[in-house]
């Protein structure tokens, strides 16, 4: 666990991180990307960190990969590239920087390290895990193979490198249906998200999809009754669900898609009101880009994603702590599964 007082003392010795309305005004171009959801007072607090991190990135030849579930000050303030897990996985293979700072959760940093072993990958908080990734192990993969001999294993990227290494190919929520459809097998094992697998199975009925019974603590909390109630209370609101939600929730929604799919849908459709049935920061990060859309309703927050903060990013990049390592033998096998996904995704034009 982080010793936050010691971290703050260390940073204070090198940086002036006191709130600065003057600096906030100087950096108003960045603030405009989040002004709808971040108050001026908060931006005055964030601005010194954003400035310090962005300067340090240049000095270190580092890039920040920011997931769509990061808070706005990270997503808009310091991220060089943003996106869902597939987009960030692809970007990790393309960036020429020496250092990748992964603003997401641990399995994402592992994936970046697997794909770019020559680069230093920093995880600002090693405790930023994932309930879904922790629900499956390599032993669980072997158990599924015994139950369904000969069936290929498709593992969600929300898994550890060890699980990826035990799998045949990976997928994300944005390419799962296409990956499954393209495989030359009738029975296919999907791990570890049971709800993603069930939603894919409904849309790819020509395949016999079997699954591991894992789930995401954010998306499993939603119920179909929640959506029915909200639709009754807020008629005319577009309900947009992530496919990690249970199938009956997805069935009640007007649209279902990955984080990038949700962004594309809302940008194209521009509904007057929208409820994003996913992690809270998703709506916050696109609010200023879509001023004509009112984002309404409840959301569920990922406690792991929220472990990543500006001060932890600055400390990690300043001290070069939180370096992610993956056993070379595991990394080689995991790289094959991820690379198969990337290659097939590119072949399919995803």
Image: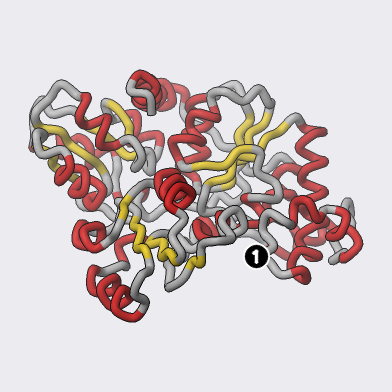
Judged from this view, the residue extending furthest toward the bottom is 233
Residue 307 appears in the picture as rendered:
no
Q: Position of residue 60 (x, y in %)?
A: 77, 32
Q: Quadrant of residue 254?
A: bottom left
List the residue tagged with mark 1: 36
- Relative side of 266 to 199, left or right: right
Q: Position of residue 99 (x, y in %)?
A: 67, 31
Q: Position of residue 112 (x, y in %)?
A: 52, 32
Image quarter hosting the N terminus: bottom right
Q: State the residue in front, 236 or 132.
A: 236
Image quarter hosting the C terminus: top left
- Element type at mark 1: loop
Residue appearing at x 65%, y 40% in the figure:
64
Q: State the residue in front, 281 or 233.
A: 233
Tag count: 1
Q: Position of residue 277 (x, y in %)?
A: 37, 62
Q: Is residue 83 above or below residue 111?
A: below
Residue appearing at x 29%, y 78% in the figure:
232
Q: Is residue 298 above or below residue 3?
A: below
Q: Quadrant of residue 236?
A: bottom left
Residue 174 appears in the picture as rendered:
yes
Q: Residues within 10 Å of mark 1 (few under 14, many from 20)?
A: some
Q: Is residue 99 above or below residue 5?
A: above
Residue appearing at x 49%, y 25% in the figure:
115
């Amino acid at each position: 666990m982080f010793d936050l007082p010691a971290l703050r003392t260390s940073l204070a010795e090198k940086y002036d991180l006191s709130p600065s309305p003057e600096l906030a005004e100087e950096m108003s171009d960045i603030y405009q990307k989040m002004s709808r959801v971040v108050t001026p007072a908060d931006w005055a607090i964030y601005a010194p960190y954003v400035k310090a991190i962005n300067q340090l990135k240049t000095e270190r030849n580092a890039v920040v990969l920011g997931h769509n579930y990061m808070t706005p000050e990270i997503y808009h303030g310091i991220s060089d590239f943003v996106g869902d897990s597939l987009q960030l996985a692809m970007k990790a293979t393309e960036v020429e920087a020496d250092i990748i700072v992964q603003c997401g959760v641990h399995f994402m940093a592992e994936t970046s390290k697997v794909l770019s072993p020559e680069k230093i990958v920093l995880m600002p908080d090693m405790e930023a895990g994932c309930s879904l990734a922790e629900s499956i192990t390599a032993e669980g993969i072997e158990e599924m193979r015994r139950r369904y001999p000969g069936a290929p294993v498709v593992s969600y990227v929300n898994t550890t490198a060890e699980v990826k290494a035990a799998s045949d190919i990976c997928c994300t929520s944005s390419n799962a249906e296409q990956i499954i459809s393209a495989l030359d097998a009738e029975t296919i094992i999907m791990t570890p998200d049971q709800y993603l697998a069930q939603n894919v199975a409904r849309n790819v009925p020509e395949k016999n999809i079997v699954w591991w019974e894992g789930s995401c603590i954010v998306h499993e909390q939603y119920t179909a009754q929640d959506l029915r109630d909200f639709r009754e209370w807020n008629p005319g609101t577009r309900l947009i669900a992530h496919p990690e939600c249970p199938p009956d929730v997805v069935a009640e929604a007007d649209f279902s898609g990955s984080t990038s799919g949700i962004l594309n849908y809302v940008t194209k459709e521009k509904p007057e009101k929208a409820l994003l049935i996913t992690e809270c920061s998703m709506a916050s990060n696109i609010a200023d880009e879509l001023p004509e859309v009112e984002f309404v309703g409840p959301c569920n927050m990922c406690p792991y994603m929220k472990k990543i903060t500006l001060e932890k990013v600055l400390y990690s990049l300043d001290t070069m702590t939180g370096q992610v390592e993956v056993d070379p033998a595991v990394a080689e096998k995991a790289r094959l599964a991820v690379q198969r996904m990337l290659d097939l995704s590119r072949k399919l034009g995803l």
